[in-house]
Amino acid sequence: MSSAQPAEPGPPRVVVIGGGIAGLAAAHRLLAGGAQVTVLEAGSRLGGKLHAGELAGVPADLGAEALLARRPEAVALARAVGLGEALQPVAAGGAAVWTRGRLRPLPGGQVMGVPGDLDRLAAAEVLSPEGLARVAREAELPPAEPGEDVAIGAFVAERLGAEVTDRLVEPLLGGVYAGDAYRLSMRAAVPQLFAALREERTLLGAARAVQSRGAAAPAAQGPVFMGIEGGVGRLPSAVADAVRAAGGEIVLGAEVASLERGADSPGAAAAAAPLASGAAPKPGEAPAGTVPARWRILAGDRSYDADAVVLAVPAAAAARLVRGLAPQAAAEFDGVRYASMALITLALPRAEAEAQLPGGTGFLVPPVDGRTIKASTFSSAKWRWAGDDDLFLLRTSVGRIDDEKTLERDDADLVAASLDDLRAATGLAARPVASRVSRWRSALPQYEVGHGARVARIRGALPAGLAVCGALYDGVGIPACVASAHRAADELLGRPGTMAA
Ligand SMILES: Cc1cc2nc3c(=O)[nH]c(=O)nc-3n(C[C@H](O)[C@H](O)[C@H](O)COP(=O)(O)OP(=O)(O)OC[C@H]3O[C@@H](n4cnc5c(N)ncnc54)[C@H](O)[C@@H]3O)c2cc1C
């Protein structure tokens, strides 16, 4: 028996693949837990779907723009990385639905378009009189039974009539998933409503119960959404700064091409090692002969060794990377569909825009109404920081699942189509002084029926030491992505004890 003492293990070394908000949040959490962290991002900028850009010389969010503040994770992260002072609530109240020929107020008291308050639904006039009467007849139906999971669109249509699905649920879900309500999972996309149906016999009652529970929660006192002065797109770089300040490494242009399991040796030393044989080790790299690590990650011409890996990339990349390690998980990733969309940001002369646009933050457009745009946000009305004395920023969105054609249209065409729709909806006649089209391809994972079970199978099929996070798992919104990042980090940090397991 050897009398040699085992070397004192150093801090666990974790490589995070993907520098979107989930990967960065995971890195931030891992560093706080004492790990050494390297983030590998394929692109030339961090943030993924969060993108701080500019138009006509003023800052503009070219991707995500709002943080749901009714759950804590995203605003807490913003505060933790020094953006607390920059958080801004929505400045104007009220969104609308452009349907049945005009803008109508989005009814209050609904949960993702499912009404809980018949009076407010009636007052909004989003539904026809027949549609409204059909909603009221839910009480005559047998108790609502969603089973293990159900497509929300079909279920709502069956309970409350197709108009509710088409004019309310579709546009609201469309705003989050760019999805098809007749395929999206009620359990995964609106879990609170699904859960409430266990106790309520009607869908209206379930929506009402979710609303009153929400109103009673402590967070209900504060704003529903927060933005960040200068754009939510600032969040990734602030998190990245905090990651670097805590000793983490972030590598851009590092598209991970393969992920391999090394020898199973807990506490292995790990560092970036050049692939090219004979290259001299750089400072901090593992010299030849160090204990092999559990994971070897190849990106470009470099390899990185690690004790554990966080995979924070969309499904197609995740499938490629785990195909050899966990074929079942790869097959599950292959089954996730993604929607593409584009945002068209317009800089308008402020005085004209303010005179011509209605009040409120913007409007949603049900697909059933056959317009090109599916929503418009009056950014300079919604956020105090957006635009300046002369410029009013506004954006529209186009594209949803199974509609790649709209994204093929050229930029000028998408701007013209947006202006046509805006004019028809609001009377806006102002011409933009500048415009910018941001195409987001394969941007939003579709939480179709059975999604929750799929996610459980993915997590169950992955080897120990490999954790996943991001939009694919526990919700597509930024707070949910951050929560999944914390879950992945905590799993690896062993709270309690899994890193060394
Ligand atoms: C247009 C748009 C608007 C949105 N608006 C909002 C909003 O207002 N509020 C909200 O809460 N949510 C919004 N969302 C949703 C939310 O922004 C996203 O779900 C979330 O940002 C996804 O973060 P993520 O880190 O999981 O993935 P991503 O942002 O996709 O990041 C993944 C990263 O991994 C990198 N990567 C991929 N493959 C590799 C590889 N092989 N090696 C290394 N790196 C790799 C990618 O380059 C990317 O940077 C919006 C989404 C879109 C598309």
Image: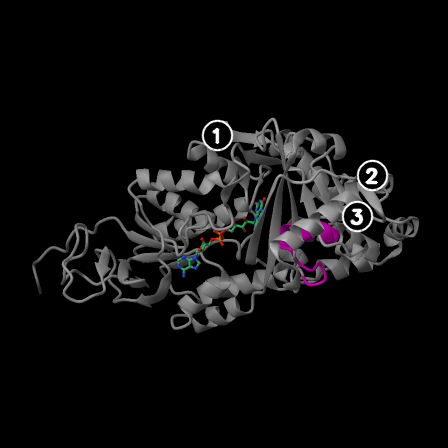
Instruction: Examine the image and state in which quarter residue 347 appears.
Output: top right
- In the picture of the structure, the residue carrying the numbered disc 1 is 84
Q: What element carries label 2?
A: helix
- Which residues make up the magenta segment? 169-183
Of the image marks 1 and 3, the number of the one nearer the N terminus = 1
Q: Is mark 1 on a helix, strand or loop?
A: helix
- At label 1, counting other C-alpha atoms closer than 10 Å, the crowd grade (few under 14, some 14-19, many 20 or more) is some
Decide if residue 230 is in sight here. Answer: yes
Name the residue type under label 2. Answer: Arg
Question: Of the residues tagged 1 and 3, which is closer to the observer?
Answer: 1
Name the residue type under label 1. Answer: Gly
Is residue 175 a member of the stretch shown in magenta?
Answer: yes
Question: Of the residues tagged 1 and 2, which is closer to the observer?
Answer: 1
Decide if residue 202 is in sight here. Answer: no
Q: What element carries label 3?
A: helix
Question: Where does the image place residue 128, in percent across and percent down from the top left?
Answer: 89, 49
Label at residue 120: 2
Instruction: Examine the image and state in which quarter residue 394 appears.
Output: top right
Question: Of the residues tagged 3 and 2, which is closer to the observer?
Answer: 2
| Prevalent SS, magenta region | helix
